[in-house]
Image: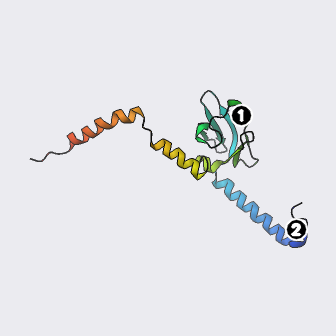
Amino acid sequence: MAFPNWIDQISEDELDAQIEQARARAEQENATQPRAKSVHFDADANLIVIALENGAFFSFPPDLAQGLAGASPAALNDVWLDASGRSVHWEQLAADFDIPNLIAGIFGTQAWMAELGRKGGSQRSSVCQSQSIPRQRQKRRSSPQKH
């Protein structure tokens, strides 16, 4: 046991007060932060799908998440939630994520996110490329001409 003499360090009243404070904090977090009720890997869509307690769903491609990129469908299916619904875990992949952070778009460490941003910023879709020139031309034509 890490704290064998903890009972000598705190009174029952202090312990009761700390427990009550912890319960109040948990109740506040449960009311204001998203909690998951289930999670699974949808192989057909190549998405991790998280069902939230409020009825909403959140999903993302595994290649966005640090530790999940390139993982096999079997490894991605080996996923579980903690009892509170606050985090999701892939034991085989040694990957753990906080649900509120995932929803906020945080899929790994700062270095991982910087690399995702660098990769994303260097690519443009063919739709964007083909539509950018006509939009620029249209802007020039629609501006009033001075004589």
Mark 2 or mark 1: name the one nearer the start of the chain: 2
- Residue lying at the far left in this picture: please name it: 147
Which x, y percent locates residue 93? 71, 40
Which x, y percent locates residue 144? 17, 45
- Residue lying at the far top in this picture: please name it: 44
Which x, y percent locates residue 53? 67, 44
Left/right placement of residue 17 relative to residue 95 reads: right
Left/right placement of residue 133 relative to residue 34 reads: left
Above or below, 118 against 15 in this view is above
Q: Which mark is residue 41?
A: none
Could you say which quadrant of the image residue 1 lies in? bottom right
Left/right placement of residue 135 relative to residue 40 reads: left
Above or below, 73 against 67 in this view is above
Mark 1, other Cα within 10 Å: few <14 / some 14–19 / many ≥20: some
Left/right placement of residue 7 relative to residue 128 reads: right
Residue 1 makes an appearance in the image: yes
- Marks 2 and 1 sit apart, C-alpha to C-alpha, by 41 Å
Mark 2, other Cα within 10 Å: few <14 / some 14–19 / many ≥20: few
Give, as a three-letter code, the residue at label 2: Trp
Q: In this figure, which residue is indicated by the disc labeled 2?
A: 6
Could you say which quadrant of the image residue 20 lies in? bottom right
Q: Which mark is residue 75?
A: 1
Which x, y percent locates residue 101? 61, 50
What residue is at 68 percent from the left and 59 percent from the top? 28
What residue is at 87 percent from the left and 70 percent from the top? 12
Above or below, 5 against 83 in this view is below
Nearest the eye: 38 or 45: 45
Q: Disc 2 vs disc 1: which is toward the camera?
A: 1
Q: Secondary structure at mark 1?
A: helix
Residue 105 makes an appearance in the image: no
